[in-house]
Image (cartoon, rainbow, N blue to C red):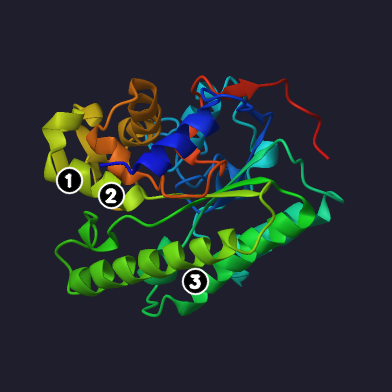
Amino acid sequence: MVPASAAFALATILGVSSGASAQKIDEIYVFGDSLSDVGKVFEATQGKNPPNPPYFPGRYSNGPVWVDYLASQLKLTSNPGTNFAVGGATTGNFKKDIPGLLAQIERFKATRSSADPDALYLIWAGANDYLGGGTDPAAPVSNLTLAVQSLEALGAKNIAVVNLPDLGKLPETRTSERSASLTYVSREHNSRLATAISNLRQNISPDIKIAYLDANSIFNQVLKAPEKFGFKNVTQPCLSPGSICDNPNEYFFWDGIHPTTAAHKLFVELTFSALQAGSETPALSAFDFTVPLGVFVFGALGTAGLIVRGKKPNK
């Protein structure tokens, strides 16, 4: 059940309550890893990684990824120039010459004197910290917190941070000896991140909105009832050495780690459909609505309360 206060807050965000003002988004800036990369590694390796085919050009999937679908929903263009995400990135600075989240933030800061206050800033990172062997969420959560604070200090007003799916239930990890430990550290990471975001909200100006998107809940819902969401296989990858499945749209995973484009699309669609329906659907439980009145919620994007304006030139 969604608390009454949260429902009222949601109505305000959507611009449907008395005196509410609509949220204005004119650009999307993205920071993270391969789940959000739209060409950085592809360009750096001259098209060798991820290989096309079988991967979609510049994406670690068989088609567009979630930031592409989100941009489309907002009637914006998925802009590689405002997407700093790099496949293989951790939450830190650099790892084997791959710019991590903090390094991406520094690159963003180096190109402008201030952040566009009407843009949406998306942060999704952390998986590579743990898939690479990390077991302590303290540093990754601290890095994510610092990333938010850096964007805020530069003038960003709308920031969304995404948590981690269960890393122990990926095709590549589910039968490995690390499965249980990855499940545990995913849970710990998400718990600490939720607390960190809550603390940040309590110490910022009311006009700065920080959203927490619980991707873990969406992930678990799909794994528990795949056919409800249009999937028949949520445990095996469509792409395996020497073969590709005949029906990728029925697979949740494209390879051993990355989702199919169908899964990326669902990730965005669940957000929109739940809020536009205005009912307590299962997808609603995946989002954090228990936020102060007027705080920007990621799930509100694309609904009646959102005004999309023309893109501004890069600053």
The dot on residue 132 is none
Q: How many marks?
A: 3
Q: Name the secondary structure under disc 2.
A: helix
Q: Residues within 10 Å of mark 1 (few under 14, many from 20)?
A: some
The residue that label 1 is drawn on is 223
Q: What amino acid is labelled 1 in the image?
A: Leu
**In the image, residue 44 lies at what x, y percent?**
62, 49
Would you identify the image quadrant in which residue 22 lies? Answer: top right
**In the image, residue 85 lies at what x, y percent?**
58, 50
Q: Name the secondary structure under disc 1.
A: helix
The residue that label 3 is drawn on is 140
Would you identify the image quadrant in which residue 181 lies? Answer: bottom left
Q: Is residue 67 visible?
A: yes
**In the image, residue 255 lies at what x, y percent?**
29, 46
Distance between the alpha carbons at the discs numbered 1 and 2? 10 Å
The residue that label 2 is drawn on is 217
Distance between the alpha carbons at the discs numbered 3 and 1? 26 Å
